[in-house]
Image (tube, helix red, strand yellow):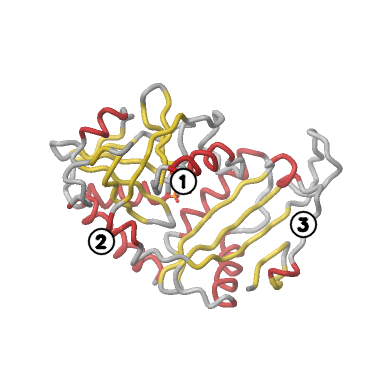
Amino acid sequence: RIVFLNGSFIPYDEARIPIMDRGFLFADAIYEVSAVLDGELVDNEAHLSRLDRSLTEIGIASPYSHAEWVVRQVELVRRNRLVEGIVYIQVTRGVAERDFGFADAMSPTVVMFTQVKTILESRLAVAGAAVITVPDLRWARRDIKSVGLLAQVLAKRQAAEAGAAEAFMVEDGFVTEGGSSTAFIITQDGVIVTRPLSSDILPGITRLAVLRLAAEAGLRVEERAFTVQEALRAAEVFYTSASTFVAPVVSLDGQPIGSGRPGPHARKLRTLYIELARASGRD
Ligand code: PLP
């Protein structure tokens, strides 16, 4: 397995990061994940734009241009012979003696690796996902794709203990988003609802693509917050992310959603997204 560390492609076993790395000590770092389908990156420009935005928001100069990132991502996919899975990028502020303050001229640590993942034939897509709700314990800048993911780690453990695939996080009665996904419902009269962008949620790249596909397919779309009660009464519930595409939800907190099987709109949107993903990879 080959990984990328600070400009070099090296075997995983040889990759070392100093213990004074601020990513390790302070979670002073951001990350990005692009899917790979048929060996090609999916909607990657949008992911690189969000990577730039995350870096800007925490004041790290982007180490590479988009074109430079892509060359490295493609090389990593090639060296690992990755057909289906993800490319993970992490940029930390760098290495310095532990201190909250930092110098302006630090050199960032850049890490990339690939992971094999079954996306197309995933069990979740066929059988649908069980989801639980948990309180959203995160900080107030969830629009930044920070590696400070402890709240999500604990939420996902709760989900796993309940036999669920994902946890929807709830604040003031409203669903913010999934632990690692964007949450959607489809109302009984067929309106697709998802929370509008703000610092409350990560601006999902898959979210944007799915909203566009839904509108093109003539479905009605509303960007507004929805409650857990509304989700329980919805015709369909689903979530989106780069690594799951569109995942139909069949139960929420143990109660069946709709028929208790993946709904027709979620299945249709999944099919449309897969077509789009394949097309984007061939660009
Ligand atoms: N929201 C959170 C908190 C996430 O961690 C993720 C992805 O990991 C998403 C939403 C979905 O974003 P994307 O569709 O860009 O993968």
Mark drawn on residue 17 = 3
The residue located at (42%, 40%) in the rendering is 167
For the C terminus, the quadrant is bottom left
Name the N-terminal-most of marks 3 and 1: 3
Mark drawn on residue 235 = none
Extreme residue toward the left, this view: 189
Residue position for label 2: 271
Name the N-terminal-most of marks 2 and 3: 3
**Secondary element at image label 2:** helix
Camera-side residue of 123 and 118? 123
- Amino acid type at circle 1 is Ser
How many numbered circles does the render carry? 3
The residue located at (75%, 69%) in the rendering is 14
- Residue 198 higher or lower than 94, as above or below: above
The residue located at (37%, 38%) in the rendering is 132
For the N terminus, the quadrant is bottom right
- Residue 9 higher or lower than 29, as above or below: below
Residue position for label 1: 180
- Amino acid type at circle 2 is Thr
Check contact, mark 2 vs mark 3: CB within 8 A: no
- Tell me: is circle 1 under 8 Å from ligand 1: yes
Place residue 71 in its image quadrant.
bottom right
